């Protein structure tokens, strides 16, 4: 059984799909592990560390992938880059398949079984495999650090002989994993924190972290969560009421962090241009949804811009990749936890159980066809 870890081809991706820790675990399962030279460089993992863990360092992608039974990646690989892998080999990565139907069809034609880690069901058994949570934790933390750096003032209240420095006010919009980590981090740094989300269950979570909850709590709000724990898309009427409530609140904030995402859909617009312009000069908006179109109307992917009235809007791409060493460590453990379920430990070979609920939830392509029901051709 050969497991391959090629270097990421997207130059903006700093994470890597394996660490020396997970390489050792794969070898203990009877695998031969090939790592492309330089794959871990941007995550602070030199080739020597992979080699010391037992991996074979290969000079290029082609030699790394040759004869692979299992390919591990961070982002979806191009089908053209998978030449040399075995027919029926498994490829596991964050596949980002919505809107990428052509790329999905090409993966199917390449004859690989492609698994999307972001489709992992949120059940107890799969907690150790939840890449959305592990990476969102890092993103939420980093958003506060980046926001504080751009703000350029102290966050906690300071009482000095020269006078009192007031605490910064931070508003978190969207209280998923990233939002909760952002709240916890902002509170630890001494800020006054408020937060909002359309899901009723988050109110108690927000308050348990010492922040104040802000929302229009009507009948639609009470039904605003899916069975899987995700936010539903709200009606235009509710969004208008929520916008009216938050507009005045945003105008008083020093830092606003937006984290709202709906799987498979563009990010909802939470901060209009007028709201951004209502904030004081020197205040900051950090948009964690910028890769999906952004929660802030003025956010620009990959850029930090300053409005005419001096508000900074941060639109960093790949926020977990801004702490690549930590996020890679967590992501690699997520991958190992899932990949381990696909391996027959006695025969020491890949043996996915196709009727397993984890496999059925994450499998995108198999046997030359698109397998996931969400991406079947429409009649």
Image: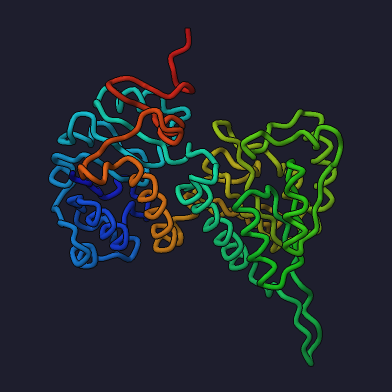
The quadrant where residue 24 appears: bottom left
* Colour treatment of the image: rainbow
The quadrant where residue 346 appears: top left
Left or right, residue 213 beside residue 366: right
- In the image, 244 versus 180, the foreground residue is 180
Q: Is residue 92 above or below residue 361?
A: below
Q: Position of residue 366 (x, y in %)?
A: 31, 25
The number of callouts visible is 0
- In the image, 140 versus 125, the foreground residue is 125
Point 15% across, 35% down: residue: 84
Q: Is residue 266 above or below residue 165?
A: above
Q: Is residue 108 above or below residue 54?
A: above
- In the image, 171 versus 133, the foreground residue is 133
Point 40% across, 28% down: residue: 355
Q: Position of residue 200 (x, y in %)?
A: 77, 43
Quadrant where the image shows the N terminus: top left
């Amino acid at each position: 059984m050969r497991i391959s870890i090629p270097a990421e081809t997207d130059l903006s991706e700093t994470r890597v799909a394996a660490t020396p820790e997970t390489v050792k675990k794969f070898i203990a399962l009877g695998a031969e592990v090939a790592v492309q030279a330089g794959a871990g460089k941007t995550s602070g993992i030199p080739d020597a560390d992979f080699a010391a863990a037992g991996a074979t360092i290969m000079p290029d992608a082609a030699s790394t992938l040759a004869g692979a039974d299992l390919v591990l990646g961070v982002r979806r690989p191009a089908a053209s880059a998978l030449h040399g892998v075995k027919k029926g080999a498994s490829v596991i990565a964050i596949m980002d398949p919505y809107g990428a139907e052509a790329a999905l069809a090409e993966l199917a034609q390449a004859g690989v079984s492609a698994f999307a880690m972001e489709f992992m069901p949120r059940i107890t058994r799969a907690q150790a495999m939840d890449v959305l949570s592990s990476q969102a934790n890092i993103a939420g933390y980093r958003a506060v650090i980046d926001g504080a750096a751009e703000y350029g003032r102290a966050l906690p209240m300071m009482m000095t002989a020269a006078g009192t420095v007031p605490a910064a006010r931070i508003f978190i919009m969207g209280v998923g994993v990233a939002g909760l980590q952002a709240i916890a981090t902002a509170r630890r740094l001494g800020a006054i924190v408020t937060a909002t989300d359309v899901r009723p269950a988050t109110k108690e979570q927000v308050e348990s972290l010492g922040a104040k909850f802000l929302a229009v709590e009507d009948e639609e709000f009470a039904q605003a969560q899916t069975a899987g724990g995700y936010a539903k898309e709200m009606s235009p009427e509710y969004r208008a009421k929520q916008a009216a409530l938050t507009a005045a609140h945003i105008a008083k904030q020093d830092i606003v962090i937006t984290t709202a995402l709906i799987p498979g859909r563009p990010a909802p617009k939470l901060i209009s241009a007028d709201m951004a312009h209502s904030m004081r000069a020197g205040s900051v908006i950090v948009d964690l949804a910028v890769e999906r179109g952004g929660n802030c109307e003025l956010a620009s992917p990959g850029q930090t811009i300053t409005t005419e009235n001096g508000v900074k809007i941060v639109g960093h791409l790949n926020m977990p990749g801004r702490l690549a060493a930590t996020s890679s460590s967590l992501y690699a453990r997520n991958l190992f936890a899932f990949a381990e379920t696909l391996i027959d430990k006695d025969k020491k070979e890949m043996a996915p159980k196709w009727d397993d609920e984890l496999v059925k939830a994450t499998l995108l392509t198999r046997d030359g066809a698109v397998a996931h029901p969400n991406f079947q051709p429409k009649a």
